Image (tube, rainbow, N blue to C red):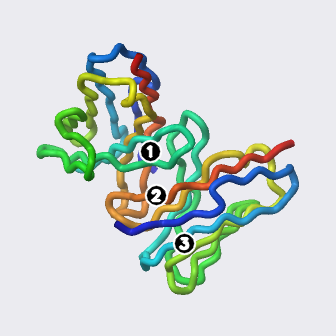
Amino acid sequence: GAVVSQHPSWVICKSGTSVKIECRSLDFQATTMFWYRQFPKQSLMLMATSNEGSKATYEQGVEKDKFLINHASLTLSTLTVTSAHPEDSSFYICSVDRDRGRDYTFGSGTRLTVV
Amino acid sequence: TQLLEQSPQFLSIQEGENLTVYCNSSSVFSSLQWYRQEPGEGPVLLVTVVTGGEVKKLKRLTFQFGDARKDSSLHITAAQPGDTGLYLCAGEHTPLVFGKGTRLSVIA
């Protein structure tokens, strides 16, 4: 399957600062990427769909001005958590759909801790 | 939103025991996927089931897709500590939406 690389693996930041997370599709040109958030002991919750060259589609309840998504190329999507607060601390994971909903490959995730 | 219910949510068993995890929905899916996630990692695809009634085997793991394509099960035979993790089912959909998962702990 496609190889998806996420960076950084973990990050600690102060409240009020912004953090950028990168998701790279290394061997597949992805017009669409997906961002998920996972709180401890819980499942993955879809945050948004990142669309190359156009605006991201956000799920209900996800603030688009707080979670900025940029998908400037077919291999890179970025998620920026702006003005981070402790409640934004979570595990953020991106994924690529390689085969029309039947073959998803996930990045290894980014553990964000806001102090 | 197509909801997927997984049961049990938590399962702790001894090494060597068998177990079954269930994934149920009121919706019909073209296919259903099972993933396993280890702490600090992204989910990894185990299998995709496509045909109603289909059974797929992956070593000690047996996956079954219901005849009506609304439910699925994962059976693990002779569980080992290495099977410990979060097991997630997801129905074919774009974007992918997961069930709440079953957290399995296999104790040596």
Answer above or below: position of A71 versus B7.
Answer: above
> Of the residues tagged 1 and 2, which is closer to the observer?
2
Answer above or below: position of B87 versus B107.
Answer: below
Q: Are marks 2 and 3 in contact (CB under 8 Å)?
A: no
Q: Quadrant of the N terminus of chain B?
A: bottom left
Instruction: Locate residue B108, reporting x and y percent.
Output: 86, 42
**Three-letter code, disc 1:** Phe
**Chain to which the residue tagged by mark 1 belongs:** A
Q: Secondary structure at mark 2?
A: strand
Judge left or right: residue B54 versus residue B14: left
Please give the residue where the numbered disc 1 appears in the rendered image. A106
| Quadrant housing residue B97 | bottom left
Mark 1 vs mark 2: tell me if same chain. Answer: no
Please give the residue where the numbered disc 3 appears in the rendered image. B24
Write the residue at 33% across / 28% down. Answer: A21
Number of labels in the image equals 3
**Three-letter code, disc 3:** Asn
Instruction: Locate residue A59, reporting x and y percent.
Output: 26, 51
Write the residue at 37% across / 30% down. Answer: A88
The Cα atoms of the two marked residues, 1 and 2, are separated by 13 Å
Say which label, 2 or 3, has the lower sequence index: 3
Write the residue at 59% across / 50% down. Answer: B36
**Chain to which the residue tagged by mark 3 belongs:** B
Q: Secondary structure at mark 1?
A: strand
Q: Residues within 10 Å of mark 2 (few under 14, many from 20)?
A: many
Write the residue at 42% across / 20% down. Answer: A11
Q: Residues within 10 Å of mark 1 (few under 14, many from 20)?
A: many
**Three-letter code, disc 2:** Phe
Q: Which mark is residue A95?
A: none
Q: Which mark is residue B98?
A: 2
